[in-house]
Image: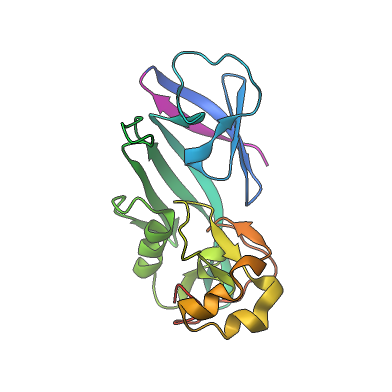
Amino acid sequence: MESTFNYTDESGRIIGTYTNDGSEIYVTLLEHKFKGSEFSDLEPIKDSILPDRFTLQHNCLCNCEFIFTIPIRLSSKGQILETFLNVIAKLGKPDERGGIDCETYKLSLNYQNNFIQSSGISGWFEDELLELQAQLPDDIFIKSCINCQFSDYSPAGYGAFGSMMCFKNLKSEYQKVKSKQDFWSIHDKHSGFVQETFLCEEFERRLPGSGYRG
């Protein structure tokens, strides 16, 4: 499903469109199309000449801000609450090390006439989303991959968004993981990478202390 969002850079604001299939993001800005697995690696899809307003580092968009929403579900005592996760993603300027000087995410959502938001200081979508979960009542949880029993991150490192490894294909093996050493034995056997906000029909709520990430 295509949605609109606000894109801002040093030249001003653009109303762009994007689609998100749970693993890849497709963005259109001024008829120019970009694709990436996360916001910090959005690359032009075609080798066309981009306007000077767009800043690229290693052929990826940066020096800009995205404001958009992601549909999300909350589970409350067995009932599903439909809402939207509001996201402000900021990508900094190219730095002398070959990266960008900052990458931040600030999240918020409304539920049952309540408003909560994350601090926006961690630089990780995971941590910002878990900040929201910590503010929810004990009987309400975010029903998405961030809270799924079969999702985890690689000890070798991962991106700020969309780098969760799904182990729904190895449920019994994953359930036995209690340490990093255990995790390495199944590390490369996952079914694919998913975004923290993705949800499939095999979701099960995560048990504390599970897998590598706990």
Provide the major secondary structure of the magenta segment: strand
Note whether 44 is above or below 68 in the view shown: above
Residue at (44, 82) in percent of width and height: 209
Residue at (59, 76) in percent of width and height: 185
Residue 204 quadrant = bottom right
Q: Quadrant of the N terminus?
A: top right
Does any portion of residue 82 appear in the rendered image? no
Note whether 63 is above or below 19 in the view shown: above
Residue at (31, 50) in percent of width and height: 120
Residue 172 quadrant = bottom right
Instruction: Residue 59: give x, y in percent of width and height.
Output: 51, 28
Magenta-drawn segment: 1-10
Note whether 142 is above or below 13 in the view shown: below
Q: Is residue 4 magenta?
A: yes
Count the marks: 0
Viewer-side residue, 38 vs 57: 57
Instruction: Residue 75: give x, y in percent of width and height.
Output: 54, 70
Left or right of residue 141: residue 170: right
Viewer-side residue, 117 vs 64: 64
Instruction: Residue 132: give x, y in percent of width and height.
Output: 38, 62
Q: Quadrant of the C terminus?
A: bottom left
